Amino acid sequence: MSNANNVFGQAYSLTVLTPIIDGHETELAEYLDGLPSGDESPLAGVHGTHFARWVVIDDVIYQGPDQGPREHLQHPRLLFTSNFDGELEPYLEALRTGLGASADTIWGHCVGYPGRDEPAFSRYLRHHQIDSSLFFAAYGDRTVEDVKRSLAVRAQLIDFALRAQGLAAPDLKAAFLQEFAA
Amino acid sequence: MANVEGKATAITVLTPIKREGPLVLWAVFWAGRHIKETLKKLEQLSFIHYARWAVIERFPDEGDGEELGHEYLLFESNFNGTWDQYIDAFSEVVPLRMKAIWGTSYGFPGPLPVEPFKEYIRRNEYVANHYWSAYPGFTTTEIISAEHVEAALGEFQAHAAELEPEAFKRAYESLLITIQHDL
């Protein structure tokens, strides 16, 4: 169920670790490595995502004899993490619909992936979820839209301030009101 | 392989926790969530967008999860700047906290000197296969500055239209001075 430690402000930290089908880790890693970045990334279609990543974890790393006998994962794992806006359930739905066929291609390499039918898809991700112990967000009360809007406003004001240098008071006021009409 | 997206860098670290570690971590993370000073320190590290720690008792599978010989500590961060600057800052600004957290993991050499610490992180780090940011061109500081600018501009706009031109100009210039460090 919902764990408060996953949340900071309105931001949620999702961590999902799914076992990769034996022998599929290279193919999965190559597929993920080859995904386009930026607006072409499948994650660009998942509303509310600030930052997200997929990481193929082949095995755990041995720290030497202090640790005792060497440990190995029975199956490699796919780590998916996301820092997103709002509640978990709507976000899982955003993943399901936003990733589309990419979700199947990626998690299709994982043991027990049921496909994108609901409620199986969101149940699968929740079953493999790890709760955060400590989550920090520098601007956890700001949604993706908030951040982008603020950045655009800042850019607009910088641009205006440069253009408006030296304007007499009446012209300045008129130009400002035109630029920043409510 | 993509630990970098625009100005953002991803770090993903997974380390085995010593036997007594989980209890210590429980207390350290409890303090982290409840003592405001802890978060203030993180805010001082003004280049972190989002970071998390998670304790993995069992690696999830179709059943009750796969139990290894130890529990594992997962750390992920999204920050701007270089990897070296990031670890340097951890080492210099919050060394005690780094020791309290990673000191519960096997093999941690301590936060200082920084070179063995970096070597430890490098050895236990996984490179992201795909990394995505909604605003890759911007740093944490720029985002927080933009929030200040938008708020100040909003206040100014609320009464700007009512001001006489000369008073408007003075208020406008005063606005720019107030937010000059955020522009």
Image (tube, coloured by chain):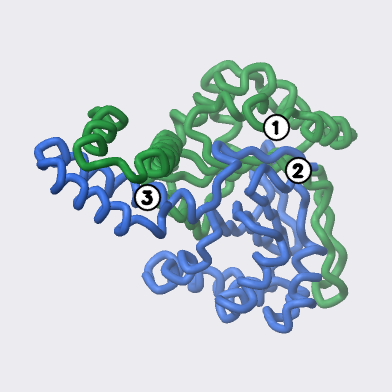
Q: State the mark number for residue A37.
A: 1
Above-or-below relation of A9 to B118: above
| Mark 3 lies on residue | A9
Q: Are marks 1 and 2 in contact (CB under 8 Å)?
A: yes
Image point 35% across, 40% down: which residue? Answer: A164
Q: Chain of mark 1?
A: A
| Mark 2 lies on residue | B2
The foreground one among B120 and A168 is A168
Q: In which quadrant is the N terminus of chain A drawn? A: top left
Q: Mark 3 belongs to which amino acid? A: Gly
Q: Element under label 3?
A: loop
Image point 68% across, 60% down: which residue? Answer: B72
Q: Mark 1 belongs to which amino acid? A: Ser
Where's residue B182, x and y in %?
41, 55
Where's residue B21, x and y in %?
62, 73
Q: Chain of mark 2?
A: B
Q: Earlier in the sequence, mark 1 or mark 3?
A: 3
How far apart, in angstroms, are the residues tagged by discs 3 and 2? Answer: 28 Å
Chain in green colour: A
